[in-house]
Amino acid sequence: MNQLLPQPQRLRRKTGKPFRIGKDSVLELVTERQEPRLERHCRRAFPEAQLSCIVGGSGYSLCIGASGSEDGSESQAPRQEAAASSREQGYRLEAAEERIHIVAPDAAGLYYGLQTLLQLPDSQGNIDPVVIEDWPDTRLRAMNYDLRQNFSKPELLIRYLADFARYKINALLIEYEDKFPFRKYPELTHPLHALSEEQLQELQSRAHEHFIEIIPLQQSFGHLEYALRRDRWRHLRETEASIGEICPSRPESYELVTDLLEEMMEAHPDSPYIHLGCDEVYSLCECEECREAFGGIRERAFIAFLNRLIEFAATRGKTPIFWHDMLDKCPPGELAALDPRSVAMIWIYNGREIESQVAAMADKFRALGIGVMGAPAVRSFEGVEHQNYPLLANRTDNLLQWNRAAETLDIGCMVATNWTATFSLGYPYGIFETTWYPMLLHAELSWNRKVDTGTYIARFLERFHGIPADRARVLQGNLRLEDYYELARKLPDEARVNPDVAELIAVMHDYEAATDRSRAAHKYAYRLELYPGDEAERHNLLDIYRRNRRGREEVRPRMTEALERYQPADMAAHYVSSRFYLHDYLERTLYRELGLNTEL
C-alpha cells in the first residue's frame, strides 16, 4: 500500500482485517446523473462481481460489499455529506473489513478513486483497512504527443490514454503537424503515417472514456516547415532561408493558417482550447514589407498577427493558447496590445531560476488579464548528442523546479512536453516509451505538489515494472530519483510488468557503449600519418576497429527489433539510420581508404 502512484494527499491506516473483492462481491454505483463511463469502468475492473447502478441524489459513490451483507449497499446521507465536502476531481475512499466505500462530488473524482482502489490490493488480492482523502492540486494535468518525427503506432497512442488516466492524467496536448488528415490541403497530410479520420475519432473517443481532454496544437507562425517547404507556399516565408516561418504581412499567410486552424478546431469539437503554437519565430521583421508595416519592431509584428489568430479562435468558441517565448522580453507598451482572450503557455526547460523566471512572466501576463499555463519538459533538446532517453538529472530538476513554481503561483494547467526533435527537419530524439519514468513523475507532482519524491523511484518500479523496492535495492543499492536509466538496463529479466520498456532502454545503453567506442577508432587513425608503415600502430588500429565494428553489428538488429514493437517498420528504420549514419559513412570512406574493412 505504500507504493501508490500518485501518492495521495492524505492516507490513514486503520486496524482490522483486510477486505477482498471477488465473485461474491456486490457493487452499488450511485450517480447524480447518468454516467455510463463509470458503469463500464466498474465492470472492467471487477468483471466477476455483481453491479447495480442507481441514478439520483447528489454526488457520486461506489460501495463494494459481500453478497448478503447488510453493508452491501450504502446509506444515502453519508454519501451526500462526504461528497459535499470533497474538492473538484477529488474523492474519499474508505476500506474496512466489511466493505469499501468511495464518494466524490463529480464523475471524474469517482473515476480517480477507482484508480487508487485498483492499486490497493496486495499480491494476494487483500486490501488493508485505510482511509484516503485525495484531490488534485492542478486542475489540468497534461501529457504531450509530438507526432512530427518518430512516434508510436496509432493503436499504442490510443492505448496509452488508459495508462495516463491510471495515474490521474486528465489532458493531452497533441501536435499533429502532417499526421493530421487535412481535407482542404490533403497534400499536407503525410502519405504513410498520418492518422486516419477513424483513428482520430477513436483517439478522441478513448480520451473521453478515460476523462481526458485533448488540446490540439496547430502551428500558426513558426515551425511550419511541412507547409512552407512546398513550392505552393514557399513565397509565404518571411525570408527564403526561414523555411518554417510565415510572413505576417502577406494576406495568404492568414488564409492558410486559419484554414488549418478551422479544420483542427472542427475535428476537436469537445476541446475548449486550441493551441496556436507561435514559438521560435526567429526571422520576424526581416522582410521589407514587415519592416515597413511594423516599424521594424519584432514584438509589434508578432502581436499583430497573433491578435488576428486569437480573434479567429475566440469567435469560434475556443480559448487560444500560445507559447510565451516570443514575448519574453517584450516592452510593456507593446505587450499591452495583446488580446486578453488568450492563455500564455510558459515553457522553460533548463536553468536554476525557473520559479523566478516563471513568476516574472506570469505577473506580466496576468496583469493584462491573460491566463497562464506551465510547461516543463520530460524530454527536450539538451545540447548533447545522445537523446535515446531523457537526460534524467536535467529533467527531474526541471520538473521539481516547475512544481515549486506551480505551487507558489497557483498554475492550474501543467503540460509535460515530450519532444521528438528540435523541429520537423531535425535529428530525432529518443523513443516515446523511454519517457515513462519522468512522465509519471510529472503525473505525481501535478496531482500532489507536496509529495515525497524521495520514494518515487521505488513506487515507480513497483507500479510500472512490478519490482518490489527491496529487490530494486539489491540491483542498484540505495535508490535515488535520478537512478532509473542506469538501473533500467538491468531490469529486462527482472520486470514482471513492462519488460519490453526495460529492454528498449537496455538496447539504447548498449548502442551508446558500442558507438562511443566506435568514435574512438578514427582518433587512432591519425597516428598512421604520424608513423606511416609502422606495424604496431596499424595492428593497434585494426584491433580497435574490429572490436568496435562487432559491437555495432551486434546492437543494430536488437535496436531494430526493439523499435518495431512500438513503431511502423519504416519509421523504426529511420531512427536506426539516424543513429548509425556516421558509422556507416566512416565505413564507406575513412575505414575503406585505410583498408581496415578489407582485413576482417
Image (cartoon, helix red, strand yellow):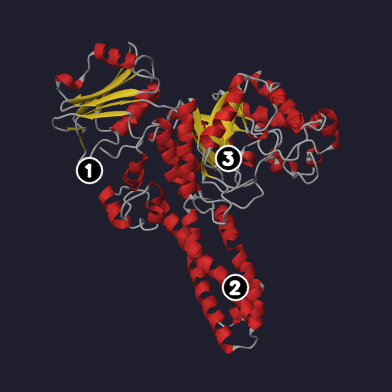
Circles 2 and 3 in contact, beta carbons < 8 Å: no
From the image, tell me which residue sits under label 1.
123
In the picture of the structure, the residue carrying the numbered disc 2 is 523
Q: Residue at x 31, y 55 (%)?
A: 477
Question: Label 3 to label 1, Cα distance in Å?
Answer: 40 Å
> Circle 1 sits in a helix, a strand or a loop, which is it?
loop
Distance from disc 1 to disc 2, alpha carbons, whole Å, reads: 54 Å
Q: Secondary structure at mark 3?
A: loop
Q: Which residue is mark 3?
A: 195
The front one of 90 and 357 is 357
Residue 358 in view: yes
The mark lying in front, picked from 1 and 2, is 2
Q: What residue lies at 46% left-to-right and 63% top-to-bottom?
A: 510
Q: Pointer 2: residues within 10 angstroms few (<14), some, or many (20+)?
A: few
Quarter assignment of residue 75 = top left
Q: Amino acid at mark 2?
A: Lys
Q: Position of residue 489 (x, y in %)?
A: 40, 57
Q: Nearer the viewer, residue 31 or 549?
A: 549
Q: Earlier in the sequence, mark 1 or mark 2?
A: 1
Check whether the beta carbons of the residues at disc 3 and disc 1 lie within 8 A of each other.
no
Q: What quarter of the picture does the C terminus occupy?
A: bottom right
Between residues 31 and 359, which one lies in front from this camera angle?
359
Q: Is residue 103 above or below residue 177?
A: above
Quarter where residue 295 is shown: top right
